[in-house]
Image (cartoon, coloured by chain):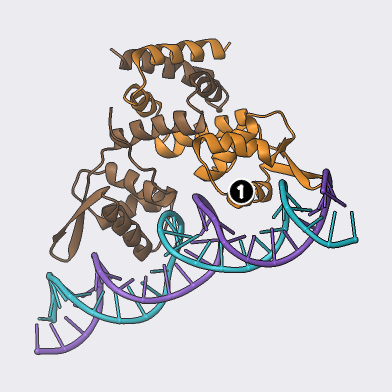
Chain colours: A brown, B orange, C cyan, D purple
Amino acid sequence: MKETIRRLPDAELEVMQAVWACEPPVARTDIETIVGQTHPMAVTTLLTLLTRLVEKKFLSVAKEGRRSLYTPLVTRHDYLASQSRRFIDKVCGGSLSAFASALCDSGLEKEELRQLRDLLERGQL
Amino acid sequence: MKETIRRLPDAELEVMQAVWACEPPVARTDIETIVGQTHPMAVTTLLTLLTRLVEKKFLSVAKEGRRSLYTPLVTRHDYLASQSRRFIDKVCGGSLSAFASALCDSGLEKEELRQLRDLLERGQL
DNA sequence: TATAATATACTACAACTGTAGAAAGTTGGT
DNA sequence: ACCAACTTTCTACAGTTGTAGTATATTATA
């Protein structure tokens, strides 16, 4: 099991999602394209968020000429795993039945819930 | 399915959890006892958080003599359901397989994962 | 009824978050 | 060598969050 990974604020998480969606190292322009599709923001805003992610050790940065190239230091999988645990513990109070009940009433379709069960079964081989 | 419910900051969520654990309406002293077990804080801090929860319409408040009595306006179940959905959408990018994979690697025991599957199955009757 | 006890309201403040303008550095092209 | 284009860094600011001291209101009681 992994050490705890801090929860990122929404805006920073959106940027990380964009970074994770690319082959590293990633240039700002690529991140901008992806983030811009769902959450347009000023270039300087994006750069501020990238700087904060570097400070928080979620990204490393390297200069290539005038550009900065970013590389994830935390994998998407590790982040999701850590936050899933956090969610069960902090939000659901550690209760699996509360968690399951919440999922059943979360708006997922019956078919999606079945799919989730199957994935859980297969995943734990 | 319910309308979206805003995510509460950690401290406010802890207070809500304590409120939900009681029979409403709840006095500050009762909340203090519960919250204090895991997260001791000054009385005024707790009162500030309660005030913010009232402002955010998570609680209603009524005076009884010198005391204030608080009643949840959002049920724990609705909050968990809403936040579960939010987690899958925002954190897992809507991918159930990413979600399942994260759960499998979240540090839950194999036995707990099996239990979760069973709960999901039973829950969706 | 004066006072101690108790409860909440008001005020405060630093750190974090979302957002972006202004400034400054880098480079390709002419 | 100069400029236009582009990139990042610096600075800024309002709103949120975590935390709590001070002031004020209420009440039981001696």
For image coordinates 35% across by 29% down, the residue present is B98
B44 displayed left or right of A33: right
Crowding near the residue tagged with mark 1, few <14, some 14–19, many ≥20 C-alpha atoms within 10 Å: few
Give x and y (percent) for residue A7: 39, 43
A29 displayed left or right of A9: left
Number of numbered discs: 1
Where A121 falls versus A11 (above or below)?
above
For image coordinates 39% across by 29% down, the residue present is A85
Give x and y (percent) for residue D12: 43, 75
Give x and y (percent) for residue B53: 64, 46
Provide the chain ID for the residue under circle 1: B
Q: Hey, which quadrant is residue C17 in on the image? A: bottom left
Relative depth, front residue between A32 and D10: D10
Where A11 falls versus B26 (above or below)?
below
Where B108 falls versus B88 (above or below)?
above
- The residue that mark 1 highlights is B43
Relative depth, front residue between A7 and B5: A7
Relative depth, front residue between A113 and B75: B75
The C terminus of chain B - image quarter: top right
Would residue A9 be seen by someone viewing this image from the given angle? Answer: yes
